[in-house]
Image (cartoon, helix red, strand yellow):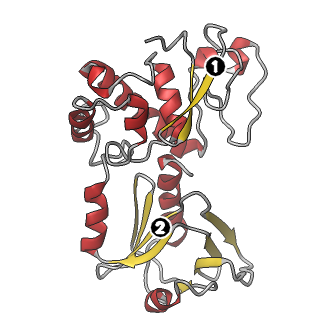
Amino acid sequence: MPEGHTIHRLAADYRERFGGRSVRVTSPQGKFSDAAALLDGTVLETTEAHGKHLFLGFGAGEWVHIHLGLFGKVNFGAAPVPPPTDTVRLRIARTDAYVDLRGPTTCALITDPEKQAIHDRLGPDPLRDDADDGEGEGEGAVRAWRRVSRSRTTIAALLMDQKVIAGVGNVYRAEVLFRHGIDPYRAGRDLTAAEWTAIWHDLVALMREGVRNNRIDTVRPEHTPEAMGRPPRVDDHGGEVYVYRRAQLPCHICGGEIRTAGLAARNLFWCPVCQSA
């Protein structure tokens, strides 16, 4: 499932290619046909992301709400615009460009109040302007800390709970905990306020970098392959990481074995030496 930086990048890509212009809207698959007919020929006025939710605003309180889930894919293309396949749930197009959406968990036309209800049930998103002041002390950090500091749940599970903090997925969860030397099994209430502020601030920086580069890189400059004289990571997910999907491999810092276990319905990765209890 894409993490929050990917959705913010998609929002920017939709806006750059189609924002402020009249677009053709179709649903070759047919599952979004009625809504597509209402939007066809209208202007895509704005785009927005919150966590793993993408919103395309067409004015008059009409939003296309998209959640990619595990199987959703978005593909952008340029002219000549090819005929769509019947697997395309939503196509937005102009004469010189198009974007196809396939296999999303959610693709629905919603109103302003329905959109607000989605925001209300989500936790703060480190990438949203309304959640952070750039110094790790924004309203979002404080709001998330209220829930974290009262919880007996492990911090690893809390970071994956979209009601606590929106947009963090399995990679950022594992990596930010390693970067701060925090045992993933520590209860939220056992963290200090300073530790949480550092985690939040780091997530803001890492996820913004993810938006810019369209990939997740979490290793510090002194731990890159070039700096350490080690081979670069070879993985479908790309990016240089400390522990994610590195089970049974040596830790870049201490040389100990990276471990993995199931937690919050996903595989957790951590170094038991660098992240000792």
Front residue (pair 227, 20): 227
Residue 116 in which image quadrant: bottom left
Question: Would you place residue 94 above or below residue 153 in this image?
Answer: below
Q: Are marks 2 and 1 in contact (CB under 8 Å)?
A: no
Image location of residue 158, percent across then percent down: 37, 36
Q: Which mark is residue 31?
A: none
Image location of residue 270, percent across then percent down: 56, 22
Mark 1, other Cα within 10 Å: few <14 / some 14–19 / many ≥20:
many
Q: Quadrant of the C terminus?
A: top left
4 on left or right of 242: left
99 on left or right of 191: right
Q: Which mark is residue 258?
A: 1
Question: Would you place residue 140 above or below residue 194 in this image?
Answer: below
Front residue (pair 80, 58): 58
Residue at point 27%, 19% (across, down): 192
Image location of residue 195, percent across then percent down: 32, 20
Tell me how far mark 2 sits from mark 1, CA to CA: 35 Å
Residue at point 38%, 29% (across, down): 154
Name the element at disc 2.
Answer: strand
Residue at point 41%, 51% (across, down): 51
Of labels 2 and 1, the one closer to you: 1
Give amino acid for label 1.
Answer: Ile
Q: Which mark is residue 66?
A: 2
